[in-house]
Image: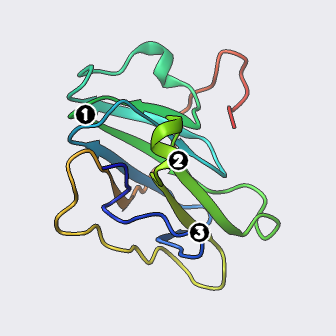
Amino acid sequence: MSRINGWPYDMHRIDFRVPFGVTERWRFTTGGNAPHPVHVHGTSFQVVSRTGGRGRTFPWEGGWKDTVLLNDTGTVEILIRFDKFRGAYDGRYLIHCHQLEHEDMGMMSNFGRGLGRPGPAVRPARASTPRGALRIHLPRREARACRAASSSAGVPVG
């Protein structure tokens, strides 16, 4: 089942909201139907841990990313912060699986930044999330900023 948190994609629904300027720890998990290259619109993030799947992070994963590969039965944690262009880019953003077949089947979720409501209002995952669905566990706010890292070009990817 190609869904995020068990919900079919609805382009008119916002599933959660992100605050401006706050570092959050997001966790992606899957129980099957992978690989899922998880792509987040609107900012870059840093991979901080990986379990299951490959079981570890590699040096090349230390830079700024906008997509991370999630393997079967894997969990990936990222630090993410939306702190660019306050007001200019408030609105609706998308997180989705970048595998075309999964994307076409609706493995996507809208999230909002700004939109008149502070902080995240998270739509809970369905209690019976089908096998193969991507789970996004968020947010766990981090008191510290993203660790210093850069891409090979020294510029954030995104």
Residue 108 image offset from top left, x and y in percent: 49, 55
**Between disc 3 and disc 1, whose residue precedes?**
3
Mark 3, other Cα within 10 Å: few <14 / some 14–19 / many ≥20:
few
57 vs 37, nearest the viewer: 37
Residue type, numbered disc 1: Gly
60 vs 99, nearest the viewer: 99
**Between disc 1 and disc 2, whose residue precedes?**
1
Which residue is depicted at the point 58% across and 84% down?
A: 117
Tag 3 near tag 1, CB within 8 Å: no
**Dividing the picture into quarters, in which one does residue 70 lie?**
top left
Q: Is residue 143 above or below residue 7?
A: above
Tag 1 near tag 2, CB within 8 Å: no
Q: Which type of secondary structure does the marked residue at label 3 adopt? A: loop
Mark 1 to mark 2 CA distance (whole Å): 22 Å
Q: Which residue is mark 2?
A: 104
* Front tag of 3 and 1: 3
Residue 115 image offset from top left, x and y in percent: 66, 80
Q: Which residue is mark 1?
A: 74
Regarding residue 145, the answer to whether it shows in the image is no
Q: Which type of secondary structure does the marked residue at label 2 adopt? A: helix
15 vs 143, nearest the viewer: 15
* Front tag of 1 and 2: 2
Q: Is residue 77 above or below residue 72?
A: below
Left or right of residue 74: residue 13: right
Which residue is depicted at the point 18% across and 69% down?
A: 127
Left or right of residue 83: residue 18: left
Q: Which residue is mark 3?
A: 11
Left or right of residue 3: residue 54: left
Tag 2 near tag 3, CB within 8 Å: no
Which residue is depicted at the point 59% across and 68% down?
A: 11
